[in-house]
Image (tube, helix red, strand yellow):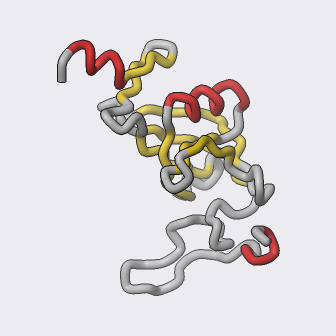
């Protein structure tokens, strides 16, 4: 990667240059601050990371809608961000959050609520049909 291209894909966040790559997105894992449970994986762009840091509420970039979204803006199931961490390569983020309600749009506490064999291992905490009418 040329120096010019590298500069375009990185954003300095108080000393750490986050590598947003060619797509302009980095994976962002949300982890429960109290239990350590992995709640979800989404993607963040520069704007999502900036809004998260400014507001203390989790913001992501929706790849399907190609827009910024605040977690819980529709459902009320918000993520208050206690800390944002960056991995060793600076190309992935970890949002350490206080989750209100469920993190998954299917009504489960975590998006990782089933095994690869299809067994349910997670708890459903809300009815998505009632929330997303």
Residue 24 position in % (x across, y down): 40, 34
Residue 22 position in % (x across, y down): 31, 34
Residue 29 position in % (x across, y down): 49, 48
Instruction: State the quadrant of the C terminus.
Output: bottom right
Q: Name which residue lies at 41% across and 39% down.
A: 26
Residue 24 lies, with reference to residue 98, above or below; the image says: above
Q: Name which residue lies at 66% across and 36% down.
A: 82
Residue 132 position in % (x across, y down): 76, 68
Q: Nearer the viewer, residue 113 or 131?
A: 131
Q: Name which residue lies at 40% across and 39% down.
A: 92
Residue 62 lies, with reference to residue 106, above or below; the image says: above
- 5 left or right of 131? left
The quadrant in which residue 51 appears is: top right
- 1 left or right of 118? left
Q: State the count of labels.
A: 0
Q: Nearer the viewer, residue 63 or 13?
A: 63
- 94 left or right of 72? left
The quadrant in which residue 74 appears is: bottom right
Q: Name which residue lies at 18% across and 24% down.
A: 1
């Amino acid at each position: 990667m040329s120096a010019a291209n590298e500069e375009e894909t990185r954003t300095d966040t108080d000393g750490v240059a986050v590598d947003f790559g060619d797509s302009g997105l980095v994976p962002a894992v949300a982890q429960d601050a109290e239990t350590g449970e992995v709640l979800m994986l989404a993607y963040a762009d520069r704007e999502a990371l900036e809004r998260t840091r400014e507001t203390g509420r989790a913001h992501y970039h929706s790849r399907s809608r190609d827009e910024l979204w605040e977690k819980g803006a529709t459902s009320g199931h918000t993520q208050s961000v206690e800390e944002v961490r960056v991995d060793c390569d600076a190309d992935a983020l970890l949002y350490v959050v206080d989750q209100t309600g469920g993190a998954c749009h299917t009504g489960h506490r975590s998006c990782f609520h089933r095994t690869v064999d299809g067994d349910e291992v997670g708890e459903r905490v809300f009815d998505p049909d009632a929330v997303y009418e």
